[in-house]
Structure formats: C-alpha cells, structure tokens
Image (tube, rainbow, N blue to C red):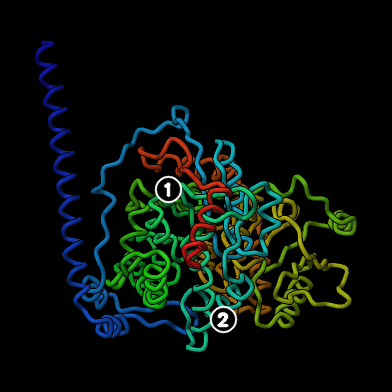
Amino acid sequence: MPATNGEETRDHTTNGRLLRSATEKASLQRHEEENIRRKVADKLSDRRKKKMLQRLATVKTDGTVEFDVAGSARIMPELIAPELSDSLRIYDEEWDERKFKVQPLQIVMLIVGTRGDVQPFIAIGKHLQEYGHRVRLATHANFREFVLTAGLEFYPLGGDPKILAGYMVKNKGFLPSNPSEITIQRKQIKAIINSLLPACIEADGPVPFRAQAMIANPPAYGHVHVAEYLRVPLHIFFTMPWTPTSEFPHPLARIKNPAGYRMSYQVVDSLIWWGIRSMINDFRKKKLKLRPITYLSGSIGSISDLPTGYIWSPHLVPKPRDWGQRVDVVGFCFLDLARDYEPHAELSKWLQAGAKPIYVGFGSLPVQDPKGMTSIIVKALEETGQRGIISRGWGGLGDIKDPPDFIYLLDNCPHDWLFPQCAGVVHHGGAGTTAAGLKAACPTTVVPIFGDQPFWGEQVHAKGVGPAPIPVNQFTLEKLVAAIRFMLEPEVKERAIQLAKHMDGEDGVKEAVNAFHRHLPKDMPDQAPDIPSDSSFLSSLVEKLRRIFCC
C-alpha cells in the first residue's frame, strides 16, 4: 500500500513537471510569434500604418475614441505585436510578507497629473520608507511643498498641471480632438519626457541619488525607456484601467459591443503612441542612446509585460478574471490629512448650525461655464431644501459676492475631514475624490469632465450608491435636482454605508507596497550602487576641462 501511494505521488509530481514544461514551451512559442509579428509590422511604412489606423478609429470631439470592432480585429494584428498572455507565464505564487527580507533601495516615483493623482503616491512612499527604502517622488514643481512636508524627497518633473488639466478638459482625455491642441499636448509631454532621466539620477540637494527601482503612472510617458536605459525594475500604478480586459472597455473608448472591449485598449494605446512616437524615439536616440522603436505600438508589449497595480477598491471594481498574476487591484490608497487639519472657526460654526450639507466641487479642474454652473447648483440646493458647500477650486466655481445662508464657499479642505460631515457629494469623478466620498459612506453624483471620470460615474451608479453620471455638458437644473433627491433616498444611504464597511477592511497602501516587493526581481543588488562623491565628480570635471583646453 505505501508503495502504491508513493507511485501516485511520483506520477503526480511528474505530471506537474510535464504541465509546467508544456506551459513554458507555449510561452516561448508566443515570444517567437511576437518577434515574427514585429518584423512584419516593421516592414509596413509609417504612412501605411497611419492610414490603417485612421480607417478603423476616430477621435471624437469629446476626446473619446470610436472604432469599428470588425475592422479592428482584421487590422490591429498587422499593426502591433501581440500581447503575451499572463496565463502563459510562470510566477512564484508563494510569497509571504512576514518572510520577505527587504534590501533597502533608492526608489523614484514618476507621477504626472493633478494633486489627486499625486496624493496616493505620497501615502505609498511613506509606507515604503518604513521598510528602510529611500523614496523620491518626482512630480510637478507646484507640489514640492506637499511632497516635502510629507517627509519624502522631491524632484521636479516638467509639465504644468494647470495647463495639462485645461488641455484634458478641452479634449476630454489624453487624445487631442482639435489640431490646435496638438502643439500644447506635445510641448507638455516633451517637457515631462526630458525631465524623467534627471529625476532618476540627479541630486536635488547635497546628497547624490541614483534610482535602483522605479514606480510610475502611465502619463509619465518615457518611464519604460528610462527603466530600460538604467536596467532597473519598473512597477506601474494607476487609478484607471490600462491593462486590456474583456470585461469592460478602455475608459477613453466609446464602444458598447463587448466583443471589442479588449481590442479597445490596443486601439487607444496605438493612437496615443502615434502622437508621441517621434518624441519618444528622439528621446531614446539622443538622451538614452537606445535604438528607436519602429513598430506601431511602442507601449503595448512593454507595459503589458510590467507588474501593474490598480488603486481602487476591489469591492467597487473587482479584478477582471483575465488579468494575470502580474496585475493587482490593491485598494484605494488614502493619505491621512484630517488628523492635522484645523478648520476655520467659521466653517465649524456653519456645519454645526444645521443639517449635513451636500458638497459640490470639481477639484483642480477648470470648468468652462463656472457662473452658469454655480447658478444651477444654488438653485438646485434651494429647490431641494438642502444646505450646500461649494468648493471653488481652480475653475472659478462659487464666485458669489453675497451667498445665501444655506451656501458655504470653501477654498481648501481635506476630503477625509469634510466628507464624513456631508449628506452627499457631487464632483467630477476623479478616482481620489470618488474614493474619499465612498469611504465616508456618502451617496455620490459624478459629473464627469474627461478621461476615466465617466468610468467611475458608471461604477458608482452600478453599485446603487449614486445616480447615473451627468456629463458636464448636460449639467442642468432638472438633472441636478433629480440627482440630489436620489442621493437622499434612505436605501441609497444604506448601500453607501455597506460599501464603506467593506472598504474599511482594505489597506490599499499596504497592499500596494506588498505588490511592489512581491514583483521585485530576485537578483536585486544587496546594496546601493556606487555613486561618485562630490570630490571625484569635481576631479573628473577638471580632467575633462584640461583635455578640452589642452593644458
């Protein structure tokens, strides 16, 4: 009997090895197919590629993409290298945080966007520091104080978030819908790209820095190429879906046919790549001394191969079944700003003077008709008998000389302090603001302006914690009144409370750091690389000058 059991065990082990071998063989075969496809794509002229792409996809005036599903299925394989399926990769599934031995690293985080995009990475960076890592957050210059006050190192990236936000509002996303916007987009992206390498290797003070690992969000175009040049691992984190899936379309794609959901990511990625490829290749050749990328999609293959973490609650949007082990949905990443916040006495007095208010604000995003929107907001609150807080932000909202008693005009206040004191929230649908509202158990109305905001509005509505999103160009008194009444329904509030309870059990910051550690290569260096001291740098500079002037 024991012998039989032993034979069964050996057979099982052998079958496991055979299965593993077959899977590895299939993976290698896919790599070969990818190489062949790239060679075919390389033979197509740029003019032919552009015509093929224009035949199947159109950038609409709202910045979203429409494309022919059947045509895409025929054309896209000719244009791009195929993705490597995560299901064919072999990963080490056994990972235990308690057994993980951390080697302190110099980590740079390359983050492009508004304050809402930057804030989750401050929380992640602070937790990385607890493991002994040296963390530099490279982002736009106007966030320097925000980053340094949190205790992280800072390095300025190019690009102006106000200009970027204005561009995104006009074009409803990353893609220029008007030829006049192309120059603005290219100038901003070029400034970002050219600042990436210095952010990874140059000092922003007396202490030298050289990144041993990188974290970035996709709008930091060029991160993949800098990681290739430095030969360091790169981990992508983002607040909107960027990994192809068959469960929902790319947030920038306008498509209702489920057959085209997965393809929509390739189409959008290819359109973005087509607009920036010359800048990327110029950067690769002149700055990084790397070969240019000649096939159409310069990012699908590389980004899909990278470990990626998504910063949203799995109770709001579960991880798609076709995302492999390289992709994690870590949860929302909150930064505790309420703890040190001291509200103005006037605000505290107003909040205590009546029922919980409705919050209305659009963060750091400009709106095209702030006076008209303000008028609608005030009338809607009056008609529904609600008190309201209007956040002024960058866009000129709430420009009222003598606001009525039921309105409070707010300049700046941490959402994690304010939202628990609100009956409901109306906002643009940025991932961070959406997260703060749901965590506070607030029924939520999303008024999307661009990008992933319609996606979050749809997810909020699907969970029953808010009405259908109101696109900003359809923002009317009637729709806002209906939305406020929807949020005040008792069953909506109860669903919001239940979702908040689920979110309370999540720790997105911890899971993000765990994901980063889990996906690090096993052959990471044991210590920081040698960095020239100031004296050796000066000696080198003197020697170069001596050679130039032949003395």
The secondary element bearing badge 2 is classed as helix
Q: Is residue 498 visible?
A: no
Q: Give the image location of residue 15, x and y in percent.
A: 13, 32
The secondary element bearing badge 1 is classed as strand
For label 2, the residue is: 170
Q: Which mark is residue 328?
A: 1
> Given contact means CB atoms under 8 Å apart, are the residues at marks 1 and 2 in contact?
no
Q: Nearer the viewer, residue 272 or 266?
A: 272
Look at label 1 and name its amino acid.
Asp
Q: Give the image location of residue 224, x and y in percent.
A: 40, 59
What residue is drawn where x is 64% and y is 66%? 427
Q: Is residue 339 visible?
A: yes
Q: Nearer the viewer, residue 204 or 455?
A: 204
Around disc 2, counting alpha carbons within 10 Å, would you say few (fewer than 14), some (14 to 19), or many (20 or more)?
A: many
Q: Give the image location of residue 128, x and y in percent.
A: 55, 41
Q: Quadrant location of the N terminus? A: top left
Relative to 50, residue 429 above or below: above
Question: In the drawing, does residue 120 fall left or right of residue 293?
Answer: right
Question: In the drawing, does residue 11 fall left or right of residue 167?
Answer: left
What residue is drawn where x is 40% and y is 49%? 233
Q: Which mark is residue 165?
A: none
What residue is drawn where x is 33% and y is 59%? 302
Extreme residue toward the top, this view: 1
**Marks 1 and 2, Cα distance to the nearest angstrom?**
32 Å
